[in-house]
Image: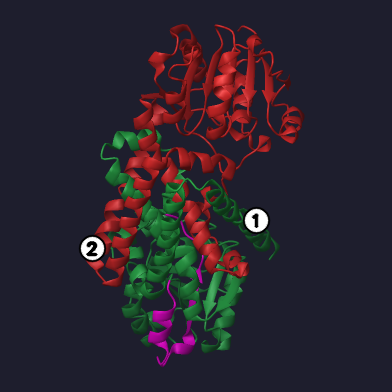
Chain colours: A green, B red
Amino acid sequence: METMKLAIVGLGLMGGSFALDFRSIYPKSRIYGFDISEENQKRAIELGLIDELIDMEELSIFDIIIVSIPVDKALFVLPKILDSINKDTLVFDVGSTKDPICKLLLDHPKRKNFLATHPMAGTEFSGPDAAKKGLYINKTNIICEIEKTDKKISKKALMMFKLLDMNIIYMDPESHDTHVAYVSHLSHISSFMLGKTVIEKEKNERNIFDLAGSGFESTVRLAKSSPQTWTPIFLQNKKNLVFAIEEYILNLNNLKEIINDNNWSNLYSILDNTNRIKEILKNTEHENKKK
Amino acid sequence: METMKLAIVGLGLMGGSFALDFRSIYPKSRIYGFDISEENQKRAIELGLIDELIDMEELSIFDIIIVSIPVDKALFVLPKILDSINKDTLVFDVGSTKDPICKLLLDHPKRKNFLATHPMAGTEFSGPDAAKKGLYINKTNIICEIEKTDKKISKKALMMFKLLDMNIIYMDPESHDTHVAYVSHLSHISSFMLGKTVIEKEKNERNIFDLAGSGFESTVRLAKSSPQTWTPIFLQNKKNLVFAIEEYILNLNNLKEIINDNNWSNLYSILDNTNRIKEILKNTEHENKKK
């Protein structure tokens, strides 16, 4: 396998994990990194995630550049990066919203070098220390507007994702943002607000200590996620997300009334119908293993 | 260790797991079981959870009776069980609400033989096949109104919980029901309604398959829980739970407005403050390991 030069802009959970997986599929590659935090840069070198720092004035030396920074920052940084690459460089982002970045770069002279991706992978942790080997293996990667990327360049990306055993889904940016509003972003909102409600109630934290265990811990897991990452995601996907939150609130209000009315059969049948999620998620696992 | 006769009424996740853990701490014991479903009884014997079936006409032979059935059924079954035990039998329930059962049994002639407990342990699965060895080890067990139980009898219970390395918390039934409304029952509601909202939106299940992965799976886990178990819990804890749901909805509505207003700093600080749950849960772990 050829010696590749990979640059990772943003050395957090997503970028750091890419470094680890990239090194395992291209052992001869050289990995460069940049982070706005000097502390993160230092740590990424200590952890062996990257070999050396990126000289941001010399982006033309790279074969692949991964942009793994908060989605608001990406809107400023990505156009600049595209301005300074060579004609064969693949640049891809891993952000959780796709419509704003795709719209922004639509007419960029180097649009053909860019691939819009969203690997459906992550944990609630952040920073270089959160980097996790194998994070991307067997995960779904949503790619938007592949037709706008140069064929030779997108082929390089697809080859890499294939080596990582990722399952590729193609979607237009608007559909992507609608779907993730429900499946990913609403999950985060529901978890953050559960955490907030419980913290407010249980002023005496001792009670949370004692009672955690039965279900709370997993449901509130996402409320540990980074505000730097999630504030701009929620705002960029505002249109879809506000609608999703409203539907969620309608369902909660409805359930509250049903409980208030002691309506056993209605309550039972709602819980029972929602149990379908069991089969749906089981099928997901099978689907993903099959691929 | 003496040969004990243990009866388990209700051979699901909670009862079945007790059978497994009980056998490991009292290897010479003989375990009897009853379930309203003949299928479950058969399965519990096949799985080796129980040695034989309970003759419900002969409850006086048991040292310990665990009542692990839905909380609505417990209101009918527990008084009858207490009517037919011998004077030294310990009867304890493991239900997720404590106020209704404690109120009901307040004046029962055998109140002294009963201990109201709520082990904060469980999974989203149900039935005898869900029984899990070690489910109770190192978990919190909330005991209500221990002063109403005969000292010799409660000592037998505490000894058993000690052998299971459970962390005992004492609480009055009303406080118990208020706290679990937030920490456990609201978690289940938020998860069930997340599942419902996503299923309604994503009529094409294919989309849920593809997009599951990033956070949805763990947040929706509790939506797989048994409606038989949870319908009566939600209804019995109606008063506290309706209030908790209302506070949750208020927080969701507030966050929706903040997102709608593009209020970055407010949104950021809410997410950031809620991150405190990280430290709180970390302390829980330490606390529990220390005990």
Is residue A123 one of those drawn in magenta?
Answer: yes
Segment colored magenta: A97-124
Helix, strand or loop at mark 2: helix
Q: Within the image, what quadrant is residue A51 found in?
A: bottom left
Is residue A173 one of those drawn in magenta?
Answer: no
Furthest-left residue in this view: B265
Q: Position of residue B246 (x, y in %)?
A: 34, 52
Q: Nearer the viewer, mark 1 or mark 2?
A: 1
Q: Residue drawn 43% across and 67% down? A: A244
Of A229 and A257, the residue lying toward us = A257
Q: Residue drawn 36% across and 55% down? A: A192
Structural crowding at the residue carrying mark 1, measured as other residues with C-alpha within 10 Å and reported as few (<14), some (14–19) or many (≥20): few
The quadrant of the picture occupied by the C terminus of chain A is bottom right
Q: State the mark number for residue B266.
A: 2
A140 versus A216 height, above or below: below
Q: Residue drawn 49% across and 39% down? A: B233
B206 versus B220 height, above or below: below
Q: Which residue is mark 1?
A: A279
